Image (cartoon, rainbow, N blue to C red):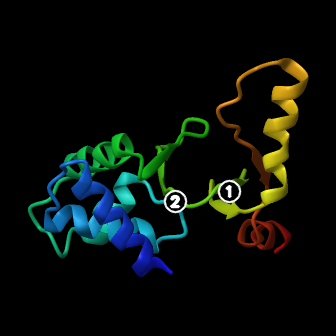
Amino acid sequence: MSEHQLKDALEALKETGVRITPQRHAILEFLVDSMTHPTADDIYKALEGKFPNMSVATVYNNLRVFREVGLVKELTYGDASSRFDFITSDHYHVICESCGKIVDFSYPGLDEVEALAAHVTGFNVSHHRMEIYGTCKTCEQKETH
């Protein structure tokens, strides 16, 4: 699955004239493979061994480029550092109130909500977002022990 997504993402970058440096390739690959919505810091830590001269600022700048091209979404929840999500099809986020972990959750049936909202209010609806909060299994287990 991710190999195909990575190829598409690299194509999209080429089309917008963004140079594909080894660092950009690695950051993008990490995002595509990562299901944990990493922070810039997570990405930096994961790749610093491979690119010793890369800084957190470099990671941020590249994430900003990806965001502007529309490949990556910046998720800001509360005051925690932004997490970055490689944009796949529409999905929602289930967020742990204890540790801040964010897990993707798909529910295609909710697309109708936009049509209904548009119909009822007369708005030209562009998008919607839904967040679900709770406690993840790991935190749940910590609390019960």
- Residues tagged 2 and 1 counted as in contact (Cβ below 8 A): no
Residue 42 is drawn in which quadrant?
bottom left
Residue 61 vs 91, above or below: the answer is: above
What is the CA distance from the residue labelled 2 to the residue labelled 1?
13 Å
Given residues 14 and 57, the one toward you in this image is: 14
* 77 to the left or right of 26: right
Q: Position of residue 45 (x, y in %)?
A: 30, 65
- Total of numbered circles in the picture? 2
User: Outermost residue, left direction?
Assistant: 53
**Where does label 2 land, which residue?**
37
Q: Which mark is residue 91?
A: 1
* 2 to the left or right of 97: left
Q: Residue at x 19, y 51 (%)?
A: 18
- Is label 1 in a helix, a strand or a loop? loop
Q: Amino acid at mark 2?
A: His
Residue 133 vs 144, above or below: the answer is: above
Q: Residue at x 27, y 55 (%)?
A: 13
Q: Position of residue 14 (x, y in %)?
A: 22, 57
Q: Badge 1: few (under 14), some or many (20 or more) residues near its Cα, within 10 Å?
A: some
* 79 to the left or right of 84: right
Task: Compare marks 2 and 1 and give the one earlier in the sequence.
Answer: 2
Q: Residue at x 41, y 65 (%)?
A: 31
Q: Position of residue 135 (x, y in %)?
A: 78, 59
